[in-house]
Image (cartoon, rainbow, N blue to C red):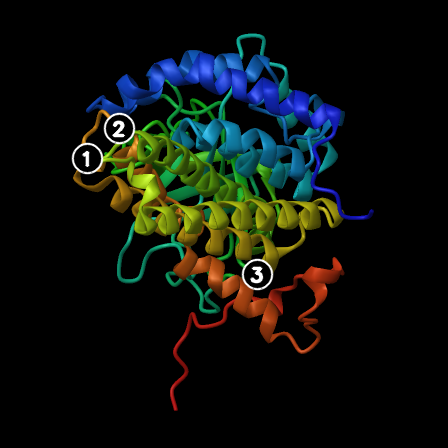
Amino acid sequence: MAIDFSLSAEQKALQSTAREFAQEVLKPLVAKADAEPDPQKGFRMVKPAYVQAYKLGLAMGPLPAKYGGGGVSNVDLQIVAEEICAVDPGFACILLVNGLALLPIAWFGSEAQKQKWLTAATSDPTGEFIAGWAVSEPAGTPGGTACFDHPDPHPMGHGTTAEHDKKNGEYVLNGRKYWPSSSAGWDFQGANVSSVTVRTDRSKGGKSGLSVILVPRGTPGMRFEPNIDKLGHRLNQNTHVVFENCRVPEENAFAIGNGDLAISKAFTWSGPVAGIAATAIGRTAYEYTLDWAKRYTAGGDQPIIMHQAPGYMLADVAMRIEACRYLCWKAAHYLDLYDSEGQAFGAMAKVYCTETMFDAVYRCMQVMGINSLDKVHPLEKCLREAAVLPIYDAGNVGMQRRKIWGVMCDADFDPRAFVDCKPIRFNKSMEGLGVKVIAA
C-alpha cells in the first residue's frame, strides 16, 4: 500500500531517543526554569539539556549530513519535535531556530559559506553552539515585520539596512531587530552566529532589496537589550538586537536581492514543526485531562468521563489531535519531496493546527473546570504555550495566511496539487498581496 502511517524501525528508535531525552533530561528542568522571573536566567537554566540534545544529534539534526548534520527528513523531524514539544515547546524552539538560521545557508549560500558555517555548527566539541535567527523588527509607523515584501523602498518593509562598503569589502549594518530567537546567546554576548535579514538596497522594495547577512558573535557594533518577558515559550530567548555601524565582511552575505525568498522558505520549513508543536501541547493536555476525568467524580457517584458532556468534549479533542498530526506529517512529506518548497502547504499545517490545538487545550480546561487554573496541573502552562503558536513563527494572520493566499492567486495554481503531491514553484509574483493599499 502506498500510504502507510506506520513508523519504521529507525523512526521508532528516533522517537524513543527523543522521548527519553524529553522525559529524563529536559522535564526535570522545566518547571523551575519556566517559573524563573528573569528570562535570560531561565534560558540559561536549560543549557545542560541543550548540550545533551546537541550530543544526541537533536540540535543540528536538520542540517545536511555533508556538513556534519543529521540530515534528518522533515517527516523524521516531526517525530522528534512532537516528543520534545510535549514537554516544553519553548525549549524545542531553541533547537528549531538552529534550522531557521542555518538552513538558509544550505539553500542559498555558496559552497564556501556552507563549509565554514554549517561545519562549525555541527562540530562544536562543547555542544554549546547556538545560532540566532533575526528577522522580526520593532513595531512602528512604519515598522514591523509582516510586510517585509512591501514593494516600496526604505523605510517601508524591513528597516534594518546594510550598506555595501565596497572599498573595505564590508557591509555596514544599522537598525534594530525585536523578537529574534537565541541571538544574544547563552551569556548575552551573542550567539555563535546570527542570520540577519537586512535591506541591502534602500531604493528597492522587499522583493529585490533584501538579503541575509551572517553576523558572528562578538562583532563590534552589535549589542543586546534586555530579553522579552513573555507569557509562554519562556525557555526560548527572545531579545532586542541593536546594530550601530556594525561592520561585517562582505563574504558573510548571501541570498543578495532574494532575502524575501529566504524568509518565505525558512518559515515554510518551520510551518509543520510549529503545527506538530501545537499537536504535542494538545496531546499533553488531552492525556492529562482524560486521566483526570477517569478518576474525578465532581462530587457525583462516578467519574466524570461517564457523563456525556465531558465524554463528547474529549472525543472531539482526540479527533482533532489525530487530524492535526497527519496534516503535519503530510506537509512534511511534501517538503521532503521538493526541497522544502511547499510554501502554501507548510503554512496550512502551521495555521490550521496551531489554531485548532489552542481550542483543544481550552476544551480540556473546561472539562477540568476551575481546577485547570491551579499550577499543580499542567493545563495552565499548556494554554500559555498554545497561545504563542498562532502568533509566532510568521504569525498566522500577518504572514502565513498571506502566503497561502499568494499561491492560490497564481493563474497556474492547481487546487489538487497538495493531495496529489504535485510540485508548485514559488515565485516572487506570489508575494506582496495585501501589503499596499491601492487608491481607487
Q: Three-letter amino acid code at disc 2?
A: His
Q: Three-letter amino acid code at disc 3?
A: Ser
Q: Is residue 59 left or right of residue 362?
A: right
Q: Is residue 132 left or right of residue 112?
A: left
The residue wearing badge 3 is 208
- Please provide percent x and percent y for residue 108: 67, 44
Q: Residues within 10 Å of mark 3 (few under 14, many from 20)?
A: many
Q: Residue furthest top?
A: 125
Circles 1 and 2, Cβ within 8 Å, touching? The answer is: yes
Above or below, comparing residue 338 to residue 220 in the picture: below
Taking depth in this image into account, of 177 and 268 the one nearest to the observer is 268
Q: Residues within 10 Å of mark 2 (few under 14, many from 20)?
A: some
- Please provide percent x and percent y for residue 309: 31, 51
Estimate the spatial distance between the alpha carbons at disc 1 and disc 2, rounded to whole Å: 8 Å
- Please provide percent x and percent y for residue 280: 46, 36
Task: Name the secondary structure under disc 1.
Answer: helix
Task: Name the secondary structure under disc 3.
Answer: loop
Q: Three-letter amino acid code at disc 1?
A: Asn
**In the figure, residue 34 lies in which quadrant?**
top left
The residue wearing badge 1 is 371
Estimate the spatial distance between the alpha carbons at disc 2 and disc 3, rounded to whole Å: 50 Å
N-terminal-most mark, 2 or 3: 3
- Checking the image for residue 377, the label placed there is 2
Estimate the spatial distance between the alpha carbons at disc 1 and disc 3, rounded to whole Å: 53 Å
Q: Residue furthest front?
A: 301
Taking depth in this image into account, of 355 and 248 the one nearest to the observer is 355
* Residue 298 visible (yes or no): yes
Residue sitting at x 63%, y 20%: 122
Q: Is residue 407 left or right of residue 71?
A: left
